[in-house]
Image (spheres, rainbow, N blue to C red):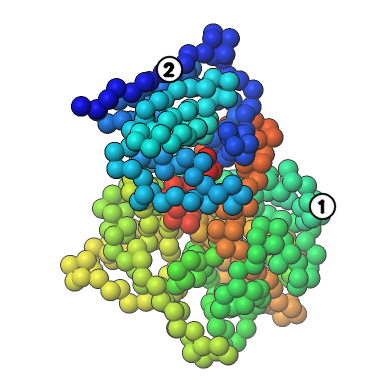
Amino acid sequence: PRRSRRITSCRLREKDMSTIAPRGLSVTGRRLMPSVANHYPRARSVTVDQASGNLRLMWCDGEARTFNPLWLRDNCSATRHKSSRQKLVSAASLPAELRPAVAEIKTEDDVLRVVWEPDLHESAYSAAWLRSFSDDIPAEVPAPSLRVVPPLMRFSVGDLEAGDDTLRWSWLSELHEHGAVLVHDAPCEKKTVMQVAQWIGPVQNQIYGEAWDVVSSENAINIAYTGEYLGPHMDLCYYESPPGVQLLHCMEFPAEITGGESLLIDAFAVANALRKSDPQAFADLSRIPATFVKDHSDRAEPVLMSFRRPHFSLNAQGAVVGVFWSPPFEGPLHAPLEDVPRYYRAYKALHQAIEEAPRLHHRLLPGEMLVFNNRRMLHGRAAFSLPGGASKRWLRGCYVNIDDFANQYNVLRRRHAALHGDGPSAAASRPIGNQDWSCGRTFGLP
């Protein structure tokens, strides 16, 4: 028979049971993610299920979490390299019969201490860090809903260039929450757009170069380089990892040009609305892969790229974590014969939903820069023509990789939550569009 295990539950005195002052440090002294730290009540007790070995942690406000012993042992901070924080012990090497011999709350540090059988390894876990992990993974996560698109929040290049950390956090937070912002007073110089991009992350090189110019021309290599209507779309869907943040800097846009206004539509809001209005279309577009193609040999550097994937990417709980929509770059559908009519019916439903969705229209002025999440916001442009005497409509653009944007956003969110005691927010757990199954939640290490 299994020998008995000593299980202790340390209860706090009544004066300790209220919410404590902000805490942002783990037991190793490292900063936790803002969704982890700050204004959480202290842990109250721990119990162990005799049959499974699961540990049940209770907090003073009644919240509780249940943890598998293998998961806890795999996340022991003592098995990570001290400076790099990389794992030194593989989960494959954990003892098969892992059980907690001792489990107790160290009230002075708000830490769960566990001694493990059979090797008597000792682990310590910040209770605040453990609280960030929920027993249940929700099927739905906070997602934007179809509504009137709010006006773009404006940020001055001069203010951002000054490097104020709080202002840059406000800038990226707004970009993450609403999908787009407007930067103004940007000098109309070719280098400006890349300078602003680098405040988010490295400029992402691709087939158009690091930066490109959107100017109408004869024999254009892209519809964007004409005056024709450009419907809502996402750029570079034929890439495995399409660009994340797109920046479009208005260099010239004479007042006598009619049309040419930029438009934005929240693709995630459209996807979630379609799930409710036409579940079958949503299911088919989450399953049947579309084909995205860039096949252009008549250019200085020929391009032949294709990528197949469904229009909607879902995680295990069915939450939308990616949307892909780019009609100008769609290639032949490759699907079983019975799926072809299903796909085209669903495609038509999505197209109609996009056309009817609320959209933001904005005519860029010289010196303005539209900055938006290409993985979330569909963008387009009204048709325009150049009257006699007008020079040209000239935008200069570049991209930042979605993961570089997410990295900068997460670093600033952790820093400012620790400074100001901010708790979790809907924006912090909103999908960023990079197909991450955690739907925007970022987990710091123990």
Q: Judge left or right: residue 361 versus residue 120.
A: right
Q: Quadrant of residue 417?
A: top right
Residue 305 position in % (x across, y down): 44, 79
Disc 2 residue type (three-letter): Ser
Q: Position of residue 16 (x, y in %)?
A: 57, 13
Farthest residue to the left: give it: 338
The structure residue drawn at horizontal position 54% and vertical position 24%, both measured from the top left corner, is 110
Front one among 95 and 125: 95
Instruction: Report the front residue among 263 and 180.
Output: 180
User: For the N terminus, which image quadrant?
Assistant: top left
List x then y, in percent, for residue 140. 38, 41
Q: Quadrant for residue 339, please give it.
A: bottom left
Which circle, 1 or 2, is nearer the viewer?
A: 2
Report crowding for label 1: few under 14, some 14 to 19, many 20 or more residues within 10 A (C-alpha). Answer: few
Say what secondary structure mark 1 lies in.
Answer: loop
Q: Which residue is mark 1?
A: 162
Report the residue marked by disc 2.
9
In the figure, 361 relative to 295: above or below? above
